Image (cartoon, rainbow, N blue to C red):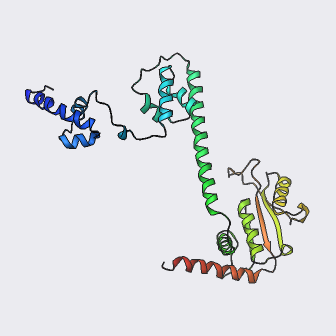
């Protein structure tokens, strides 16, 4: 592309104006709009050698990381090595150092794979820390529940997870089955709130036949604070050879069954509470 004499004259005329505006503290965008220069190459030439105003340099929490990444790159480190060292993403590293010379490759395929693997592990660790921090912040926001909040939470939990009466099979009894220890603890706290005595509660375990049944029984007995001998007879689930089970390992304890004796009246209250929650949610603000 050739430049005409007209372009040259325009540049010579605009250069002093651009320099003056820059020294007056204007940003690139402001100068561009003021002088009607919308070509970045020309704008770069007009402002060449003129210091950037301090106010346009926005603070960046990653400035230190960027500087360190550039320093490591000049020492000959690869993106993978820098990622392992700093724990940041390779996309960010690329943006920070892509103008610097590439280091010579002098490692084996196995070494490169090991470095990449460590980089990925560092990234996974960072993601897990972010995930746990999000959960921790959310848990802290809930705080202690009032009695009304616990009443609502427990009724909703039961209606989602507990056994329910059917028109074709009247079973007005409170039976709650769950594998989540947190759900069990919440349900027991809720039973205490609504006046159910401990002697009216029975516990039993449901678990797959291939699991450690004795360990599971002890786990649930310890959780609810009863002797393992007080548990009702454990229900053993038979193995289906066509099914590939994923609930295996030391963390698998089956489910705990919580039964409330003589609970027809409590069941009716639960159903009423649930309908009240639904109506309360549907009322206009």
Q: Quadrant of residue 235?
A: bottom right
- Above-or-below relation of 116 to 154: above
Image-based side of 263 in relation to 19, left or right: right
Image-based side of 141 in relation to 20, left or right: right
Image-based side of 84 in relation to 157, left or right: left
In x, y percent, where is residue 190?
73, 72
Residue 239 or residue 182, whichever sits in front: 182
Q: What residue lies at 75% left-to-right and 50% top-to-bottom? A: 251
In x, y percent, where is residue 252?
75, 52
Residue 134 or residue 114, whichever sits in front: 134
The answer to whether residue 169 shows anywhere in this view is no
Q: What residue lies at 60% left-to-right and 81% top-to-bottom? A: 276
Numbered-mark total: 0
In x, y percent, where is residue 253?
77, 55
Quarter of the image with the N terminus in it: top left
Residue 59 or residue 221, whichever sits in front: 59
- Above-or-below relation of 81 to 232: above
Q: What residue lies at 65% left-to-right and 82% top-to-bottom? A: 272
In x, y percent, where is residue 224?
82, 63
Residue 17 or residue 226, whichever sits in front: 17
Identity of the residue furthest to the front in this view = 24
- Above-or-below relation of 54 to 45: below
The answer to whether residue 82 shows anywhere in this view is yes
């Amino acid at each position: 592309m050739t430049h005409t004499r007209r372009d040259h004259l325009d540049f010579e005329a605009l250069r002093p104006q651009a320099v003056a505006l820059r020294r007056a503290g204007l940003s690139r965008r402001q100068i561009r709009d003021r002088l009607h220069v919308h070509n970045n190459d020309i704008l770069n030439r007009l402002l060449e050698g003129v210091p950037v105003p301090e106010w346009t340099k926005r603070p960046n929490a990653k400035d230190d990381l960027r500087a360190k990444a550039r320093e490591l790159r000049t020492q000959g480190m690869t993106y993978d090595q820098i990622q392992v060292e700093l724990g940041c993403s390779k996309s960010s590293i690329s943006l920070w150092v892509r103008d610097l010379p590439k280091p010579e490759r002098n490692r084996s395929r196995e070494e490169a794979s090991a470095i990449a693997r460590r980089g990925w592990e560092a990234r996974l660790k960072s993601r897990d820390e972010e995930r746990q921090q999000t959960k921790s912040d959310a848990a802290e926001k809930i705080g202690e529940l009032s009695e009304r909040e616990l009443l609502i939470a427990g009724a909703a939990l039961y209606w989602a997870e507990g056994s329910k009466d059917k028109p074709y099979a009247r079973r007005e009894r409170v039976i709650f089955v769950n594998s989540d220890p947190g759900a069990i603890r919440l349900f027991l706290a809720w039973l205490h709130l609504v006046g159910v005595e401990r002697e009216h509660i029975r516990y039993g375990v449901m678990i797959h036949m291939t699991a450690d049944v004795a360990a599971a029984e002890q786990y649930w007995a310890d959780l609810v604070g009863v002797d393992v001998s007080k548990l009702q007879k454990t229900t053993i689930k038979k193995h289906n050879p066509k099914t590939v089970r994923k609930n295996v390992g030391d963390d698998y304890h089956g489910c705990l069954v919580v039964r409330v004796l003589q609970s027809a009246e409590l069941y009716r209250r639960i159903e009423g509470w649930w309908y009240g929650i639904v109506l309360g949610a549907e009322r206009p603000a």
